[in-house]
Image (cartoon, grey):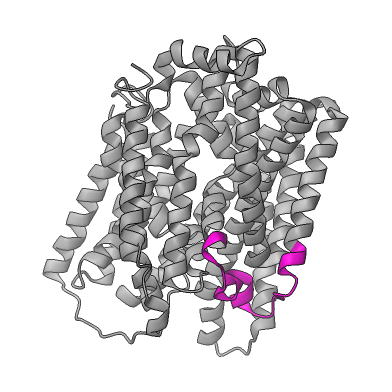
Amino acid sequence: MNGIALISFLAVIIAIIAVSLLTSKKSKIKNVAGLFFANRKLSFAAVGCALFFTNVNAAEFLGGSEAAYINNMTTMAWGVSSVFAMVIVSEFIMPVYLRGGINTTPDFLRTRFDNGTKMLVSAIFLIGYMVNLLPIILYTGAVALNGMFRISDVFHCTYFGGIVIMVLFMGIAGGTYSVLGGLKIIAVSDILLGVCLFAGGIFLTYFGLRYIGNGDWSSGWHQLLTTHKEHLNAIGSATDAVPFSGIFTGMLLVNLFYWGTEQVIVQQALSAKNLEMSQKGIALTCCGKLAGPFLFMLPGIIAVHAYEHMPQTIQVFPKLVRDLTPPAICGFIAAIVFGAAITSFSKALNSSGTLFILNIYKPYLIRHRKKFNDGTLLLASRKFETVAALIAILLAPMIIFASSNFYTYMQKANATFSIPIFTVMFVGFLTKKVPPIAAKCGIVFCATGYLLTQFVFQTGINFLHILALLFIATTALMLIIGQFAPMKPVKRPVKVINSYLTPWRRRHWVNALLVAVMVALFVLFSKAGLAG
């Protein structure tokens, strides 16, 4: 472990923590609104950065670089095409949530269907977070930092042992940050990390181009654009990890679920001062996602020119940082990766606590007529988050035995939970006639069908297309049940005053510009552009 890199790493981390603490010290956590929603006072910059770094963790750095190195830039579609989904969420879904006074996305299902559907989806969310989302965040952060600092060499242990050490360290740090800091301090950290991320991306690209250009970055850039051009292609064929047609089928559904119904994401947008700030924040997040190919995939393209063969392709990003950048920059980038992982982990824990307290624990206390106050709920949330963190710490190292293509594995695992929930939410928005029993049947049918097609039967069909087929089949099933057993319409009171619901006046032309840039990126990274 290089001493200068370690000093740089610690200096950046300490500075971010110190500024975050000083900025948020006036916002003391006195109730669940303060812990879970930052008292609903976040600016658009805080919302935008919070949304971006909820999505960005070490998995983006590792997975994006690995995918570009072993194949091409087709996986950039996950981030770039999400802009279209975010535009839809900003325009149509967020006003519904704010108008209904929604705290968690399952709250909508209680309003639309019944409390049983809300409880079922809350349980699915919590299971998904503890066995999938939280462990993945810890694992990818551990892999990245172990690769940059050679933790396994420092402690004279195996590679797996180094991963375990880093998982434990990051789990404790992230859990403490969430339990003691709440959403406000995490949001401030995200703004600082956003500035550092773009600086780190510029540094890594510059030194990477210098390396492959033998000391001349312009020569390296020329080499990048003229050799191994097949890696610059983002228009995937049927054999690629992301076929281009998949963007319009399963990927669109996953992105709509993630940005429109995923509790960790929605909770950041609901913490805004009003609808206008929420929509501005989502637009800012879109800008970050459009920069994703240059931040997360360009290092993999540089690695194609720097390394002819790598036995562990998930090590592409940390090896590139360690080998090609000066120690101070290496420590700086490591701090960004660590910070992104910690804030993502903290927000996922915070959202887990939100779901547990507001959807399970508080209703249980009310149902059994037990006395409670905000202090009781805060204590219970912190205990639950501690347990969730411990479970994630235990499961995270086991991911090392999963798929060789980590990014694809991660997306497949996420789809197990996402599409069943999104389908039920979609039908709930679409019609008022489908009854609660249809929602429950839909969740079970969709989840079972996906697991069977991925782990039991070999269909030979890309999982994105399977997701689209299951979405259509589940929607049809729910609509058929609704025809035979329609639900009686129920009028619900509107809980939110109109001043919160004034939309952003310039959103239409900004959203049009964002979608245009999205299309331009696909043209740029295609055979009609740089890959031609």
Name the image quarter holding residue 466. top left
Q: Is residue 140 magenta?
A: no
Query: What residue lies at 43% left-to-right and 49% top-to-bottom?
Result: 286
- Residue 152, given in percent of the width and then of the height, sits at 78, 28
Q: Is residue 517 left or right of residue 218?
A: left
Q: Is residue 24 left or right of residue 426?
A: right
When the figure is inspected, residue 233 is found, relative to residue 81, above or below; the finding is above
When the figure is inspected, residue 482 is found, relative to residue 531, above or below; the finding is below
Is residue 96 at least partly visible in the picture? yes
Query: What residue lies at 56% left-to-right and 20% top-to-bottom?
Result: 302
Q: Which residues are magenta?
A: 21-45
- Residue 295, given in percent of the width and then of the height, sits at 54, 35
Q: How many marks?
A: 0
* Magenta span: chief secondary structure: helix
Q: Is residue 33 magenta?
A: yes
> Can you say which quadrant of the picture contains the C terminus?
top left
